[in-house]
Image (cartoon, rainbow, N blue to C red):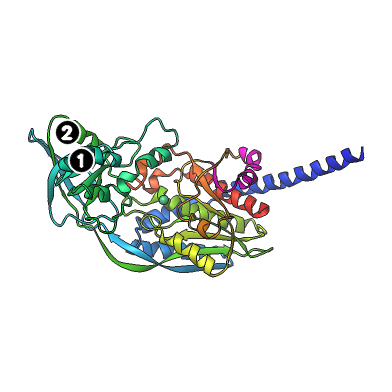
C-alpha cells in the first residue's frame, strides 16, 4: 500500500513537471505566433541588407544588423568574434550560349560556382556529356580532352527527403571541376542541384585540389540542362561562356554572438544559423530563416523571464557557404578558452514548416531527446531521429566529442526550388511557418537547458 502511495506521489510529481513544461512551451508558442518579430526581422535582413556573401559590403552590413538587433533586446552580453574569411566575387553577371549542328543557338541561365576561376574572356568548346563524376573514367581522357564536361546527374525524384537527393549529386558541384581537369577538360558545366525543372541556375561551393589545373565551373538551369541533353541526342553541342569571378585576399570578418548567462553553471548551449549567404537572391531560406529563428528563440526566452541553468548562446555564424571559417574558429576559440560546451542546435534547412530535430549523439542522448516526443507532438513536432546537426556547429564535435547536437528538421519538399538561386527571397517564406520554426527552436533550447 505504502509503495503504491509513493508511486502515486511520484507520478503526480512527474506529471506536474511535464505540465510545467507544457505550460511554458505553450507560452513560447503564444509569444512567437501572436507577438513574433522573426518575420519582420527576416524582411529587414533580406530587403535592407540583401544577399551577403562573405567578404562583401553586404556581409559587413549584416554583421552590424545582427549586432544592433541583438543589442536592442538587452541580453547580458552581445559581442563580435573576429575571424579570417576568404573573399570570392562573381564580378559581372555570367553569360552563356549553347549552339548545335543545326545552327540553333540559345542563351543559357548560368551562374559560376562559388570559388571558380573566371574564363578570361570568351571560352568556347564542345560539350561532352558525363552523367556523373563517377562516369569520368568510363568516358575516358580521349573523349574528354579539350572539351567542356557537362555533368547532368539529376535529383532522384523518388527520394522523400530532398536533402538525400541533393547529397547524392552534390559532388558534381563540389569536385566536378577538379576531377574533370584530371581528364584535361577545359571547363565544367553542371546541371543545377535543384528539385524542380525551372529556369534558374543554382550556385554553391566548389573547390580545387593542389597541383590540379584550375578550370572554370558553372551551373546551368535544369531547363537548359534538359535542352542540352535533347540537343546532344541529335549531334554535337557547343558552348560559349564568359565569367570574370575571382578570389581576392582573405579578409577579417565576425561571428555575432548574444548570451543569457547561466544561473547555475558555466556550461554552454550554442544555437544558431549562418549569417552569410550566396550572392544571388536574398538568402531568405538559406539561411536568413535560421538567423531569425535563433534570434527570436533567445528573444522569447528572455522576454518570458526564463531562469536558464546554463549559458544560452545565440551565434550568427559567418562564412558557412564557402569555407565554414565561422564555425571552425568558433570551435577553436571555445577550446582555447576552456569553455564547457554541452549542446549545440542549428537551423539551416530553410523557413518551412518545422517537424522535429535530427539528433547527433550517442544512443543515450537520442533517448534523452526522445523523452519529449509526446510533449512536442501537440506542437506538431514528431520527427526525432539520429541524424546530422549542421555545418556551423559540426566543428564543435571535434573538440567536444561528448556533446549533444541537434539540427532542426523542416519539411524539405520546396527547399531545393530556392536553394542558392535568385528565387531565395523574402517573399518565398511563409510567416506562419517561420514563426513555428522560431518557437520550435526556443522550445528545444528550453528543454535541453532544463534536462542537460
Ligand atoms: Zn545554409
Residue at image position (49%, 40%) is 353
Q: In the drawing, does residue 295 fall left or right of residue 377?
A: left
In magenta stretch: residue 357 = yes
The residue nearer to you, when weighing 353 against 133, is 133
Q: In the drawing, does residue 90 fall left or right of residue 308?
A: left
The residue nearer to you, when weighing 28 against 15, is 15
Residue at image position (35%, 58%) is 52
Tell me which corner region of the image, top left, top right, bottom left or bottom right, holds residue 275. Answer: bottom left
Residue 203 appears in the figure: no
**How far separated are the C-alphas under marks 1 and 2?**
18 Å
Tell me which corner region of the image, top left, top right, bottom left or bottom right, holds residue 374. Answer: top right
Residue range of the region highlighted in magenta in the rendering: 356-377
- Tag of residue 140: 1
Q: Residue furthest right?
A: 1
Evaluate if marks 1 and 2 touch, with contact meaning CB atoms under 8 Å apart.
no
Q: Residues within 10 Å of mark 2 (few under 14, many from 20)?
A: some
Residue 366 appears in the figure: yes
Amino acid at each position: 500500500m505504502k509503495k503504491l502511495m509513493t508511486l502515486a506521489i511520484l507520478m503526480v510529481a512527474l506529471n506536474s513537471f511535464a505540465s510545467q513544461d507544457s505550460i511554458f512551451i505553450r507560452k513560447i508558442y503564444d509569444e512567437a505566433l501572436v507577438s513574433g518579430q522573426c518575420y519582420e526581422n527576416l524582411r529587414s535582413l533580406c530587403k535592407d541588407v540583401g544577399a551577403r556573401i562573405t567578404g562583401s559590403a553586404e556581409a559587413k552590413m549584416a554583421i552590424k544588423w545582427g549586432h544592433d538587433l541583438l543589442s536592442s533586446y538587452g541580453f547580458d552580453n552581445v559581442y563580435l568574434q573576429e575571424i579570417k574569411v576568404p573573399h570570392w566575387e562573381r564580378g559581372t553577371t555570367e553569360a552563356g550560349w549553347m549552339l548545335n549542328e543545326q545552327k540553333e543557338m540559345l542563351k543559357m541561365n548560368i551562374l559560376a560556382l562559388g570559388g571558380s576561376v573566371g574564363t578570361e574572356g570568351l571560352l568556347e568548346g564542345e560539350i561532352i556529356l558525363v552523367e556523373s563524376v563517377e562516369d569520368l573514367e568510363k568516358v575516358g581522357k580521349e573523349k574528354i580532352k579539350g572539351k567542356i564536361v557537362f555533368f547532368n546527374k539529376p535529383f532522384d525524384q523518388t527520394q522523400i527527403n530532398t536533402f538525400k537527393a541533393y547529397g547524392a549529386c552534390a559532388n558534381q558541384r563540389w569536385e566536378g571541376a577538379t576531377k574533370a581537369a584530371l581528364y584535361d577538360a577545359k571547363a565544367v558545366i553542371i546541371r543545377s542541384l535543384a528539385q524542380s525543372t525551372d529556369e534558374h541556375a543554382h550556385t554553391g561551393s566548389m573547390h580545387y585540389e593542389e597541383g590540379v589545373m584550375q578550370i572554370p565551373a558553372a551551373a546551368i538551369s535544369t531547363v537548359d540542362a534538359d535542352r542540352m541533353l535533347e540537343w546532344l541526342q541529335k549531334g554535337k553541342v557547343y558552348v560559349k561562356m564568359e565569367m570574370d569571378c575571382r578570389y581576392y585576399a582573405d579578409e577579417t570578418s565576425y561571428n555575432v554572438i548574444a548570451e543569457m548567462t547561466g544561473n547555475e553553471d558555466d556550461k554552454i548551449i550554442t544555437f544558431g544559423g549562418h549569417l552569410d549567404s550566396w550572392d544571388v537572391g536574398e538568402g531568405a531560406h538559406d539561411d536568413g530563416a535560421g538567423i531569425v529563428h535563433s534570434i527570436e528563440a533567445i528573444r522569447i526566452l528572455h522576454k518570458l523571464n526564463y531562469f536558464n541553468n546554463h549559458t544560452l548562446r545565440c551565434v550568427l555564424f559567418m562564412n558557412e557557404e564557402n569555407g565554414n571559417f565561422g564555425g571552425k574558429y568558433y570551435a577553436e576559440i571555445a577550446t582555447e578558452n576552456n569553455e564547457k560546451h554541452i549542446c549545440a542546435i542549428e537551423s539551416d534547412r530553410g523557413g518551412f514548416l518545422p517537424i522535429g530535430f535530427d539528433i547527433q549523439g550517442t544512443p543515450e542522448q537520442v533517448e534523452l531527446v526522445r523523452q519529449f516526443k509526446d510533449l512536442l507532438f501537440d506542437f506538431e513536432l514528431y520527427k526525432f531521429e539520429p541524424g546530422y546537426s549542421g555545418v556551423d556547429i559540426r566543428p564543435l564535435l571535434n573538440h567536444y566529442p561528448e556533446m549533444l547536437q541537434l539540427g532542426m528538421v523542416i519539411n524539405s519538399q520546396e527547399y531545393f526550388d530556392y536553394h542558392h538561386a535568385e528565387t531565395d527571397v523574402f517573399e518565398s517564406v511563409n510567416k506562419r511557418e517561420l514563426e513555428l520554426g522560431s518557437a520550435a527552436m526556443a522550445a528545444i533550447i528550453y528543454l535541453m537547458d532544463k534536462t542537460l
